[in-house]
Amino acid sequence: MPQVVSNYAPPFLFRNGHFATIYSGIIRSVNGVVQKRERIHLSDGDFLDLDWSDSFTPTQKLVVLLHGLEGDAQRPYITGSAKILNQNGYDTCAVNYRGCSGEPNNMYRSYHSGATEDLIEVLDHILNTRKYSEIYLKGFSLGGNLLLKYLGEGNDVPKELKGAVAVSVPCNLHDSCKQLLSPKNILYAIRFKGNLLGKLRQKQQLFPEKINDANIKKIKTLKDFDDIYTSKAHHFKDALDYYEKSSSLQFLPNIKVPSLIINAKDDSFLGSECYPIKETDENPQLYLETPNHGGHVGFWGKNNITYTEKKALSFFDSL
């Protein structure tokens, strides 16, 4: 489909991509969402925690929410999404990836940008235990890449899955990694690396035979982390092999479910290869919106409802 014309025009301060990103990630708070946790056990012996919130009225519609790198189901971009959806006739199921729900997962492996096998098990669980006639996906950053890869890599997508919205998506993971390693993003990279190393040290205590202090000391950048842990724990050759095989860009031509990608032009995490103009032009099921502003998972909006929260609701309602 042709690109979606964006009418997003935030106030002056939020026209700075970094300010929009930091406000959303650190300052914003969302109240009034009641979540009920369910633990599901995966086929490999691990577990996932799902945080459910209910529509204000009885419904057969569900949105599965997927967070970003080192996020969880309590991040404001997740609870903000849940709040507006619950107010408008949708239940929500916010997935905490392996190791992201407040306690370490059981396995040496954890989560990554292309781990669609876990999303498949979540959807199978939902379809086997609950009665929904309409299911939608909404993902942010890593979660957006994950859902797009799932939709396009040849999985047996259930008939109940009607549409998807992906926000601030690093469609080309190597391109995004290069952006995160650049000086403009040094503070974000330091924060991400610190969180990831904290979890890796927990893994070291549980699996000392697989990770040692010497390995950890070699990790100077996010790419080093993916070379030393992510790739090895998830059966890739190295970081570049992981990025190549897990990037959603290559799978976009095969998506057959209406899907909206919203990537701001001032998102400092995304390089030029993360804006899939050609792919969306050639696939009638794909929609791409590239507002001038918004930052990374920012998109400030009035009344503490972000632009992408309103946009996702209207997109789902239209399907």
Image (cartoon, rainbow, N blue to C red):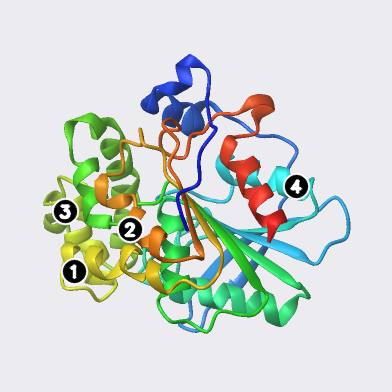
Under circle 3, the secondary element is helix
Q: Which mark is residue 211?
A: none
What's under tag 2, amino acid-wise? Lys
Task: Please name the residue that numbered disc 1 is placed on.
Answer: 241
Which residue occupies the foreground of this view, 154 or 34?
Answer: 154
Q: Which residue appears at 41% of the width and 59% of the height?
A: 280
Alpha carbon separation for disc pair 3 and 1: 13 Å
Task: Please name the residue that numbered disc 3 is placed on.
Answer: 224
Residue 202, quarter of the rendered image: bottom left
Q: Which residue appears at 42% of the width and 50% of the height?
A: 141
Which residue occupies the foreground of this view, 159 or 237?
Answer: 159
Which quadrant does the C terminus fall into?
bottom right
Q: Which residue appears at 61% of the width and 80% of the height?
A: 158
Q: Which residue appears at 79% of the width and 48% of the height?
A: 88
Under circle 4, the secondary element is loop
Which one is closest to the eye, mark 3 or mark 2? 2
What's under tag 3, amino acid-wise? Asp
Alpha carbon separation for disc pair 3 and 2: 31 Å
Alpha carbon separation for disc pair 3 and 4: 38 Å
Mark 1 or mark 2, which has the lower sequence index? 1
Under circle 2, the secondary element is helix
Task: Please name the residue that numbered disc 2 is placed on.
Answer: 278
Q: Which mark is residue 34?
A: 4
Which residue occupies the foreground of this view, 33 or 293?
Answer: 293
Picture layout, residue 191 above or below residue 143:
above
Alpha carbon separation for disc pair 2 and 4: 41 Å
Image coordinates for residue 200, horizontal then vertical, percent:
30, 56
Image coordinates for residue 143, horizontal then vertical, percent:
46, 57
Which one is closest to the eye, mark 1 or mark 4? 1
Which residue occupies the foreground of this view, 41 or 77?
Answer: 77
Mark 2 or mark 4, which has the lower sequence index? 4
Alpha carbon separation for disc pair 1 and 4: 40 Å
